């Protein structure tokens, strides 16, 4: 048997017979072709891979659009067909303020964000006239997620077609390199859409959840648009707990709320503690709690700027408590590990208060994030 | 009724064609090997082992395709609502219902008839993350 196997192998590899010669020629031809068309072949393989992801992105985008339309139809009780309006919203473009002259950019940025926010909510009101505030906020959030999915698909499609048209190895390579991250983010937005539709709390809501837990049963009032504050005594100190107004999907205006509180108290606040979700690094566990210094407020930077400015004006120390989350957890329904970190965060707030403030001091605690599914 | 709206299966026609071609070629070669063996008594083990490997590989690929439906991210994972009594701290966990939100007051406590509220809403993570070894 071994002899047979040996003979067969020799037949293929030997140069003395015809088969051997053909194999040699095939190898040589393959080598020459690879030298000449290797990169083109690689481009074709990469394009095929991108095509697969693009197909998936299209499915996600279309499914997101379908969910948005059907949910609005269901809520408006079939009074009118929202398809045309939803399609128009999904193509909505936000133009950021000019940054050539950075002076006053924050005010302009805030104004543009407000206008966009109002516009989206007005569109929802027009589609669902008898919806309450919570539903309007949730639907506006859902449309934003659908819009993000549409934009992502269109950008990836643009670079794919550009790469295909120009056969540029480098355009295709760059697109292929960032595709895993894009796919991860798109899937996160897809699950966000489901969470916004049903009004479930999302990972980003961990800050408002801690604030809600602290101010539960206490009287609260609206201090800034869509932002509430409650006076809560903790360890002999008076704390002002700030959060976005829930349970509708909302981030509120925590920067404005903290600024107003500080101006009201004429700066007589001994510490500001900000609680927010933070992007976890690979290897870190979701729900891990860490502490830091500074203003832990994400987003476009308007609220962060306001808090930094007013804290600097009155020389107030800033503490941050961060809850680590992966990109896929931030906008999807809050996972158990993150929800369970609330007790640890409250323990740390109490420790900071005891160690760094005196009895009778005034402290501001702000829970930052989207408060969907979390009341106060 | 909709069947699992979040998952979708993309049919890879190209891959199916390759698998079918591979299986067909393997069977033809196997027949040739048997024919040669019967006629001349020569057993081409190399060709036979290549055929069997190709068939095994094709079957494996076909199973791989079956096992991986296209996940889009819209799949609804199990979401639970924890209700707690504000007097006796009695807790009950049930499935999330639309309209639930944290701190919403719900039905009276079955134990002490005190007021209850939604204490927590969370999703169970469906799979354990793969842990990569680090030095």
Image (cartoon, grey):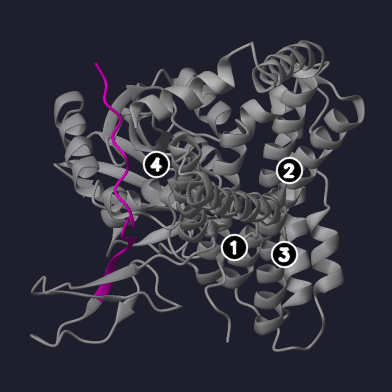
- Residue B135 is situated, as x and y percent measured from the top left of the image, at 24, 16
Closer to the eye: label 3 or 4: 3
> Label 3: which residue?
A65
Q: Secondary structure at mark 3?
A: helix
Instruction: Kindly identify which numbered label has been placed on residue A366.
Output: 4
Report the quarter where the C terminus of chain A lies. bottom left
Instruction: Kindly identify which numbered label has been placed on residue B93.
Output: none
Q: Taking the image as drawn, is residue A130 in sight?
A: no
Closer to the eye: label 3 or 1: 1
- Residue A207 is situated, as x and y percent measured from the top left of the image, at 38, 46
Q: Are marks 3 and 4 in contact (CB under 8 Å)?
A: no
Pick the residue in front: A292 or A169: A169
Report the quarter where the N terminus of chain A lies. top left
> Label 2: which residue?
A51
> Label 1: which residue?
B9
Region in magenta? B117-135
| CA gap, disc 1 and disc 2 | 15 Å
Closer to the eye: label 3 or 2: 2
- Find residue B89 and report its image quarter: bottom left
């Amino acid at each position: 048997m071994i002899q047979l196997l040996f003979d067969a192998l020799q037949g293929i590899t030997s140069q003395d017979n015809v088969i051997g010669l053909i194999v040699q020629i095939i190898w040589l031809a393959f080598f020459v072709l690879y030298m000449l068309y290797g990169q083109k072949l690689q481009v074709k393989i990469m394009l095929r891979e991108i095509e697969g992801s693009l197909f998936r992105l299209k499915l996600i985008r279309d499914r997101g659009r379908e969910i948005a339309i059907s949910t609005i139809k269901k809520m408006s009780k079939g009074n009118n067909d929202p398809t045309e309006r939803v399609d128009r919203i999904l193509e909505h473009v936000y133009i950021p303020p000019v940054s050539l002259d950075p002076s006053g950019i924050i005010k302009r940025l805030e104004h543009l964000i407000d206008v966009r926010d109002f516009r989206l909510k007005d569109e929802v009101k027009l589609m669902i006239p008898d919806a309450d505030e919570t539903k309007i906020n949730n639907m506006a959030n859902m449309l934003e997620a659908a819009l993000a999915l549409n934009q992502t698909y269109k950008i990836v499609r643009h670079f794919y077609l550009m790469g295909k048209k120009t056969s540029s190895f480098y355009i295709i390579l760059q697109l292929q390199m960032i595709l895993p991250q894009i796919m991860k983010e798109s899937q996160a937005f897809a699950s966000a859409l489901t969470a916004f539709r049903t009004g479930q709390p999302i990972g980003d809501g961990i800050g408002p959840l801690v604030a809600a837990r602290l101010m539960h049963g206490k009287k609260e009032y609206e201090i800034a648009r869509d932002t509430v504050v409650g006076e809560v005594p903790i360890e002999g100190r008076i704390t002002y707990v700030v959060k976005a107004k829930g349970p509708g999907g909302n981030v509120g205006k925590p920067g404005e709320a903290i600024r107003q509180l500080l101006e009201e108290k004429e700066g007589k606040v001994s510490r500001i503690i900000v609680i927010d979700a933070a992007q976890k690094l690979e290897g870190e566990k979701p729900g891990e709690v860490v502490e830091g210094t500074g203003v832990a407020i994400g987003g476009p930077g308007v609220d962060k700027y306001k808090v930094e400015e007013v804290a600097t004006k009155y020389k107030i120390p800033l503490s941050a408590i961060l809850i680590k989350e992966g990109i896929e957890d931030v906008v999807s329904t809050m996972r158990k590990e993150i929800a369970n970190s609330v007790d640890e965060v409250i323990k740390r707030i109490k420790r900071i208060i005891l160690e760094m403030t005196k009895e009778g001091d005034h402290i501001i605690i702000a829970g930052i994030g989207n408060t969907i599914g979390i009341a106060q | 009724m909709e069947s699992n709206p979040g998952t979708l299966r993309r049919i890879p026609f190209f891959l199916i064609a390759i698998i079918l071609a591979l299986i067909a070629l393997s069977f033809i070669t196997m027949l040739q090997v048997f024919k040669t063996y019967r006629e001349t008594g020569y057993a081409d083990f190399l060709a036979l082992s290549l055929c069997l490997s190709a068939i095994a590989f094709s079957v494996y690929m076909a199973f791989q395709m079956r096992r991986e439906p296209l996940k889009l991210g819209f799949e609804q994972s199990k979401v639970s609502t924890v209700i707690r009594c504000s007097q006796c701290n009695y807790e009950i966990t049930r499935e999330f219902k639309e309209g639930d939100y944290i701190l919403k007051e719900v039905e009276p406590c079955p134990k002490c008839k005190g007021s209850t509220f939604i204490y927590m809403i969370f999703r169970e993570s469906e799979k354990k993350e793969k842990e990569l070894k680090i030095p």
